[in-house]
Every structure is written in structure tokens, then in C-alpha cells.
Amino acid sequence: MGIATVRVCALVVGLFAGCAAACAGGPPEPVGAPETISASPQNPQPSAQPEQPARVQPVDAAALGASWRPGCPVAPTELRRITLSYIGFDGRSHRGQLVVHRDVVGDVIGIFEDLYSVRFPIEKMSTVDHYPRAADELSMEDNNTSAFNCRPLPSGSWSLHAYGRAVDINPLVNPYISATGDLQPVTSRAYLDRTRTDRGMIRDGDVVVRTFAARGWRWGGHWRDPIDYQHFERR
């Protein structure tokens, strides 16, 4: 047998031996450890805390516009304008304003910070003087979250909104219903169906009701006449 033939035979024998070892479960050739890669999430969630702190400012009669008038049960000096962050229906952070009594400023800031942290959606947040004659109906139809408005109840006594001690949240999707069928806003009939799952709806026991209750605020959704799903108050 020639030298070349011997080399070929040796190569073939070696190949068969390698195959036999692999089939018998022989140890694989060692490889290096995989490279560790650190990657950021493709769509990181916005911070659960507001990027800007709440800002509190005094107000006067001129700043309150049509929402206040002489004869209202509180003077402008008893009220404060709070600029707050909230999560909009678009899922983004926005800034809005509420006017409340100075005694509940701490409550309101804490409540809306808590609602921001759980990303509860609020469509709009403007003081009612942005609407003609500070009309509550127009603000509600616009699904605007608001607080102070010097207006009476149907009974003739002052609403707690007139004291800056009540907040209405997403009022279009959380309507007011009286025992006689009075509906506010008048455009909210579709939302009498509380099995709907629209953004910003409030339900008994949900995070909004619990957050207000933890600070001593009552929810109008627990009432019988009227039922007021949008309304939270503290006396």
C-alpha cells in the first residue's frame, strides 16, 4: 500500500471515530460564554410620578371670572388655584388647574398625585371660568374635571362647589341623575349604562372612590337621590 493510500485511510478512520464519539454522547467542544447585552425597553412607560410638582396660587375676583360673584358663601381670599399633572385620555401627561378651598389643598394635591401614579385617565382639567358664564352644563358636556363654582343646588342652598369643597371628575361619562330623571349633562344618557368600559368612568370600589375615601371625601355615586357619579365632596 502506498503512502498516499495510508494517509487517506487514516483520515477516514479518524472521521468515523469522531462520528462515533458524537453519537455516543461525547462531550461537545467547549464554547465561550454568551455575550451579555443590556437593552432598554422598546416602549418605556412614562414615570408614575408627575414630572412637575403641584403649584398653589392665591386668586382674586378678577382671576375667578364668572365663577364667583358678590354674595357667594366664600371670599376669593379663601380659595386657591392648584396647577396639577394628570394623565389624559391619550395616555400622556398634561397640566390642568382646579380652584378649591384653602383647607382642602393638601387633600386635592395628594389625591391627584395618587390618581396620576395609577394612570387613571382624565380628559380635561380647566377652571369653569373658561366656559361662557362659567356654565356648569357646558363644562360637563366637555367632560371637564373641575371644582369651585359659585352655584346653588336645585333646593336653593349652596352646592359644596360654591365653597370649593367638591370636585367633579369626567362628568360626561359619570353623570348626575335625579329621582325625577333630571340628567346632567343632558348629553350623557349613553353613560347611564354603567356596564360600559369607557375611559374615565368611575365605579363603586374602584381606585378613584378608594383614593378619595382614604382622605375623608364622600362619593355621590353612593347616594340615592340624586345619584352623582362624577361628584366627590368633603364638608
Image (cartoon, grey):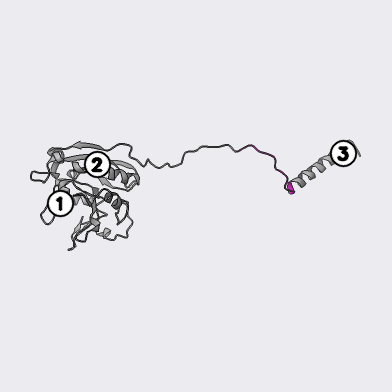
| Type of amino acid under label 2 | Gly
The image quadrant of residue 195 is bottom left
Residue 125 visible within the image: yes
Q: Is residue 32 magenta?
A: yes
Residues shaded magenta:
22-33
Q: How many circles with numbers are drawn on the protein? A: 3
The quarter of the image holding the N terminus is top right
The image quadrant of residue 128 is top left
Q: Earlier in the sequence, mark 2 or mark 1?
A: 2
Q: Residue furthest left?
A: 71
Disc 3 vs disc 1: which is toward the camera? 1
Residue labelled with disc 3: 6
Residue 101 visible within the image: no
Residue labelled with disc 1: 159
> Where residue 188 sits in the image (x, y, percent)?
24, 57
| Type of amino acid under label 1 | Ser
Residue labelled with disc 2: 106
Observer-nearest residue: 231 or 6?
Answer: 231
Q: Is residue 203 above or below residue 83?
A: below
Q: Is residue 7 above or below residue 156?
A: above
- Disc 1 element: loop
In the image, 18: left or right of 85?
right
Q: Residues within 10 Å of mark 3 (few under 14, many from 20)?
A: few
> Where residue 146 sits in the image (x, y, percent)?
22, 47
The image quadrant of residue 156 is bottom left
Q: Residue at x 79, y 44 (%)?
A: 17
- Disc 3 element: helix
Q: Is residue 94 magenta?
A: no
Check residue 231 in the rendering and tell me which mark sits there, or answer none: none
| Type of amino acid under label 3 | Val
Q: Residues within 10 Å of mark 2 (few under 14, many from 20)?
A: few
